[in-house]
Image (cartoon, rainbow, N blue to C red):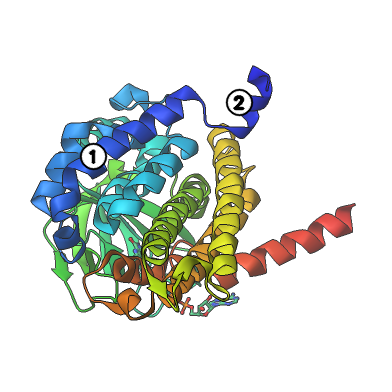
């Protein structure tokens, strides 16, 4: 193989090194990762381990202490692949530092960038993104949180729901209605009027909560980007990070297959290894095949997104749908071939079975993404 063809189909040394760094963290946290995965607040030892690794710096630009000139989708994706295989808590902690701060990185004012990005990259501060509301999910344009200018301040009122890191975050990027448009604002958690509650806990425990903004006053320079131009920034955030969900899904699927293999290669029924019994061999082989397909598309989409996130959005969306759906199937097959041992509470496979489920819903549900891809297909045909 020439160097050129290897570069096209394999990760380069820089990204493999990042995966090695991520693997060093997962090796270190194994003894408490199951406990952290049950936590509804950020687990202090997990945070300390990620902080000591310096990996969160992948999530901010080099000018603020980051590892890459600008946040790099492929780096985020390959690190998430490794972290998610060990712990959803660890993966989410890493991912949200980027998802919660990306708009600040690309469009925050100088004082806001200088205040937040270095501490987010060093994990001294936790970031969050507030889009969803109690009555608004996929249809974000229906949101009702508002921001208005009052003298030399902005006033934010509203209710954000199902917000990862709510309560533990130091800073929220919040999408709000601003007259006829939508504006993203940066709200420090310590601001008066920011009220946290935890009305929901989900089947795969997650640091999650609701955030009410009750007449929250922030300085004018806390607008992120231009007023009325919040949606393009949300789109840019999705374009950069949606593919990283695919990376996490590939990591989870691979771990599920590894668990299924360990079990079925070690257990005999009817005098035969379960791995060679009835349809089990083809179930294992199909899972392997689907994981390799998902990984190939994910790396390709992430590399394209690292070059130009918006231009690669369709590919990233396909990778997200493809890999999360594969992860769901692979986890389900793994449980099936492990029989009753696939159902044991507290086991790795139980965790994976629960962890893969939300991935088909957040950061663009499968149906919403397929709907927009289908529109793109028709548009392509019309312009061909
Ligand atoms: C673990 C977790 C963490 C989250 N973290 C955050 C966070 O940090 N910040 C944040 O803002 N939000 C967060 N969310 C919320 C998440 O973004 C929403 O769940 C997601 O946008 C989907 O909205 P919904 O759940 O209200 O579903 P709905 O929008 O009500 O959709 C319900 C069903 O209808 C389908 N549907 C909806 N619209 C269409 C359409 N146009 N075409 C076809 N089908 C459609 C969907 O696919 C889905 O199956 C999180 C959610 C979870 C589960």
Q: Secondary structure at mark 2?
A: helix
Q: Residues within 10 Å of mark 1 (few under 14, many from 20)?
A: many
Task: Give 326 or 209, whichever is nearer the viewer.
Answer: 326
Residue furthest out toward the front = 271
204 lies above or below 293: below
Residue 258 location, x and y as percent? 40, 56
Residue that appears at 31% across and 75% down: 341
Residue 22 location, x and y as percent? 31, 38
* Residue carrying label 2: 7
Residue that appears at 34% across and 74% down: 342
- Which of the marked residues, 1 or 2, is nearer the chain's N terminus? 2
Q: Secondary structure at mark 1?
A: helix
The dot on residue 25 is 1
Q: Is residue 256 left or right of residue 91?
A: right
Q: Residues within 10 Å of mark 2 (few under 14, many from 20)?
A: few
Q: Residues at badges 1 and 2 in contact (C-beta under 8 Å)?
A: no
Task: Give 197 or 115, whichever is nearer the viewer.
Answer: 197
104 lies above or below 157: above
The dot on residue 281 is none
Q: Is residue 246 left or right of residue 382?
A: left
Task: Give 384 or 252, whichever is nearer the viewer.
Answer: 252
């Amino acid at each position: 193989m020439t160097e050129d063809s290897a570069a096209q189909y394999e990760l380069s040394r820089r990204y493999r090194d990042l995966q090695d760094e991520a693997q060093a963290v997962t090796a270190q946290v194994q003894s408490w990762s199951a406990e952290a995965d049950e936590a509804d607040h950020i687990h202090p030892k997990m945070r300390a381990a990620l902080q000591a690794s310096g990996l969160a710096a992948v999530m901010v630009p080099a000018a603020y202490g980051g590892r890459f000139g600008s946040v790099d989708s492929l780096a985020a994706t390959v690190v998430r692949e490794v972290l998610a295989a060990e712990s959803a808590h660890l993966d989410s902690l890493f991912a949200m530092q980027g998802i919660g701060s990306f708009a600040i990185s690309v469009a925050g004012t100088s004082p806001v960038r200088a205040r937040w990005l270095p501490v987010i990259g060093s994990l001294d501060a936790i970031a969050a993104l507030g889009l969803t509301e109690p009555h608004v999910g996929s249809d974000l344009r229906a949101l009702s949180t508002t921001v208005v200018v009052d003298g030399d301040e902005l006033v934010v009122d509203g209710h954000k729901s199902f917000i990862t890191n709510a309560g533990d975050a130091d800073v929220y990027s919040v999408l709000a209605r601003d007259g006829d448009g939508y504006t993203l604002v940066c709200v420090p958690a310590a601001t008066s009027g920011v009220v946290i509650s935890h009305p929901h806990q989900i089947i795969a425990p997650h640091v999650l909560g609701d955030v009410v903004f009750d007449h929250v006053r922030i300085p004018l320079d806390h607008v992120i980007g231009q007023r009325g131009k919040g949606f393009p920034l949300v789109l840019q955030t999705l374009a950069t990070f949606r593919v990283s969900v695919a990376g996490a899904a590939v990591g989870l699927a691979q771990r599920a297959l590894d668990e299924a293999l360990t079990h079925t290669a070690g257990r005999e029924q009817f005098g035969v290894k379960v791995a060679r019994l009835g349809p089990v061999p083809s179930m294992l082989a199909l899972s392997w095949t689907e994981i390799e397909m998902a990984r190939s598309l994910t790396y390709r989409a992430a590399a394209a997104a690292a070059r130009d996130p918006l231009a690669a959005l369709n590919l990233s969306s396909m990778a997200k749908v493809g890999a999360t759906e594969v992860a769901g199937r692979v986890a389900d097959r793994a449980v099936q071939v492990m029989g009753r041992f696939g159902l044991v509470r507290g086991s790795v496979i139980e965790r994976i079975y629960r962890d893969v489920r939300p991935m088909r819903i957040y950061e663009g549900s499968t149906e919403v993404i397929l709907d927009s891809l289908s529109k793109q297909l028709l548009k392509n045909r019309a312009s061909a």
